Image (cartoon, rainbow, N blue to C red):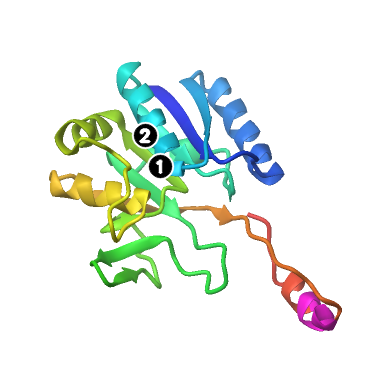
């Protein structure tokens, strides 16, 4: 394996993300995994993803581990995703905004996206996902880029991550989710004095990932 950890970001990364990334890097070093890190910044996330994808192709990495800079995860993340044996596999995580819906999709239509509300116990096939935590073989990236002219350019009705999923499926690739990999998505909330009682209730239910 020759791994590229690809992290697209606009400018800053979260402290909790960096703690998780450092722990992951230490584990990869302990396991003597051949890897490099590409924290690629820019205003347009899809262009950062495109640059990472082309680096992986041109420098002959075998896999790209995509991580968003607002995710938290376990140091065993790579091992757990690799265990699935799939060329494209994501972990489970939910949106960080109110509603907190799953970022793992059952079906993707022009006017409707159906999300998973519950998850199978074993690795399962999906229609698409966000790219907050995805392991993908570089051969899939290469095939999409060559056959579609782009990996991550958004479509009219789809963001860059789901657009990639659609392109890959059109070429016959299957996408999977490994439910043993559960990631946290870092969000922000604003507290006003009148929210004090609600805040106390909320904080009591928060558990660290």
Badge 2 marks a residue whose secondary structure is helix
Question: Magenta residues?
Answer: 194-200
Q: Position of residue 20 (x, y in %)?
A: 63, 40
- Is 111 colored magenta in this rendering? no
61 sits left or right of 194 in the view? left
Secondary structure of the magenta portion, mostly?
A: helix
Badge 1 marks a residue whose secondary structure is helix
Residue sitting at 56 percent across and 41 percent down? 10
In the orientation shown, which residue stands out farthest toward the right?
193
For label 2, the residue is: 50
Q: Nearer the viewer, residue 92 or 192?
A: 192
User: Is disc 1 surrounded by few (<14), some (14 to 19) or many (20+) residues within 10 Å?
Assistant: some
Q: Position of residue 207 (x, y in %)?
A: 68, 62
Q: Position of residue 83 (x, y in %)?
A: 37, 40
12 sits left or right of 42 in the view? right
Does 161 sit above or below residue 192?
A: above
């Amino acid at each position: 394996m020759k791994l590229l950890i690809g992290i697209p970001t606009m400018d800053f990364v979260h402290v909790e993300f960096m703690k998780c990334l450092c722990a992951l890097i230490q584990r990869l070093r302990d396991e003597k995994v051949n890897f490099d890190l590409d924290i690629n910044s820019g205003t347009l996330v899809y262009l950062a993803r495109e640059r990472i994808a082309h680096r992986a192709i041109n420098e002959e990495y075998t896999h790209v581990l995509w991580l968003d800079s607002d995710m938290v995860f376990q140091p065993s993340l790579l091992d757990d995703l690799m265990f699935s044996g799939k060329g494209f596999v994501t972990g489970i995580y939910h949106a960080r905004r109110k509603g907190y819906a799953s970022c793992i999709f059952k079906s993707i239509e022009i006017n409707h996206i159906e999300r998973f509300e519950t998850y199978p116990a074993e690795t399962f096939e999906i229609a698409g996902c966000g790219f907050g935590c995805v392991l993908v073989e570089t051969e899939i990236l290469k095939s999409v880029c060559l056959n579609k002219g782009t990996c991550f350019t958004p479509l009219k009705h789809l963001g860059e991550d789901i657009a990639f999923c659609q392109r890959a499926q059109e070429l016959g690739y299957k996408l999977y989710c490994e439910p043993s990999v559960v990631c946290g998505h870092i969000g922000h909330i604003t507290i006003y004095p009148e929210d004090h009682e609600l805040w106390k209730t909320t904080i009591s239910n928060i558990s660290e990932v």
